[in-house]
Image (cartoon, rainbow, N blue to C red):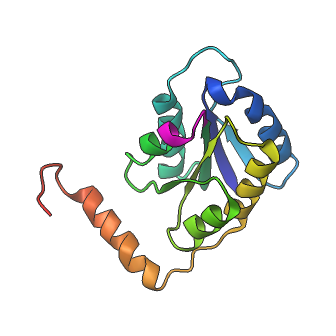
């Protein structure tokens, strides 16, 4: 599996530990983040990773910023991206199995690296169930094609 990985300056310390872990696996890493603590704009980092998934350069992406919220919001602006902010393994499992999430957002602050690694492994090992869930994903895909001024 090819994983696009991006982070902002708030997640630099956690980035190193997560990348070290991922490099020991069979996954290939497309590193799009920063290794500096100098301020960068999380929307640009999320955009790089979203484009990697959209263009099939990567199978999935992992995004980390201070809260994970900004990265998640930014990534979900791109067609075909289903980014889930997960703070536990249950959320990661459900994001994959029910929502076919292709991007994982994580908190870089107030989150233990071991917990984030467990969430990552759960996410990467998860499988989409399809079935009744596909109808909802189809609804989301249709809404991505509607004009911004479309009425419900």
Q: Which residues are magenta?
A: 65-71
On-image quarter of the C terminus: bottom left
Residue in the image at 67% along x and 58% along y: 88
- Give left or right: position of 59 versus 81: right
Instruction: Identify which residue, 103 or 28, lies in the foreground.
Output: 103
In the rendered image, which quarter is residue 12 located in?
Answer: top right
| Residue 20 relative to residue 136: left or right | right
Q: Residue furthest bottom?
A: 131
Residue 58, visible in the rendered structure? no
Q: Position of residue 42 (x, y in %)?
A: 51, 30
Percent of width and height locating residue 53: 53, 50
Res. 112 image quadrant: top right
Q: In front: 80, or 41?
A: 41
Q: Quadrant of residue 122?
A: bottom right
Residue at image position (67%, 34%) is 109
- Look at 12% across and 56% down and name the residue there: 150
Q: Is residue 123 above or below residue 105?
A: below
Q: Is residue 63 above or below residue 131?
A: above
Residue at screen point 67% across, 69% down: 126
Q: Give the farthest residue toward the front.
A: 110
Residue 75 image point, x, y percent: 46, 44
Q: Nearer the viewer, residue 56 or 147?
A: 147
Q: Is residue 67 magenta?
A: yes
* Left or right for 103, reference 3: left
Residue 44 can be seen, yes or no: yes
Question: Residue 21: within the magenta?
Answer: no
Viewer-closest of 2 and 69: 69
Q: Residue furthest top?
A: 38
Number of numbered discs: 0
């Amino acid at each position: 599996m090819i994983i696009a990985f991006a982070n902002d300056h708030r997640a630099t310390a956690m980035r190193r530990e997560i990348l070290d872990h991922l490099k020991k696996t069979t996954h290939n890493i497309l590193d799009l983040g920063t290794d500096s603590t100098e301020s960068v704009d999380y929307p640009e980092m999320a955009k790089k990773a979203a484009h990697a998934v959209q263009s099939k350069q990567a199978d999935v992406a992992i995004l980390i910023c201070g809260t994970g919220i900004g990265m998640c919001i930014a990534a979900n602006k791109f067609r075909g991206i289903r980014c889930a902010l997960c703070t536990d393994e249950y959320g990661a499992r459900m994001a994959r199995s029910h929502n076919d999430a292709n991007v994982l957002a994580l908190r870089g602050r107030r989150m233990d690296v071991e917990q984030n690694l467990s969430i990552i492994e759960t996410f990467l090992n998860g499988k989409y169930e399809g079935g009744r869930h596909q109808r909802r994903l189809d609804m989301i895909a249709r809404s991505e094609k509607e004009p911004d001024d479309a009425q419900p």
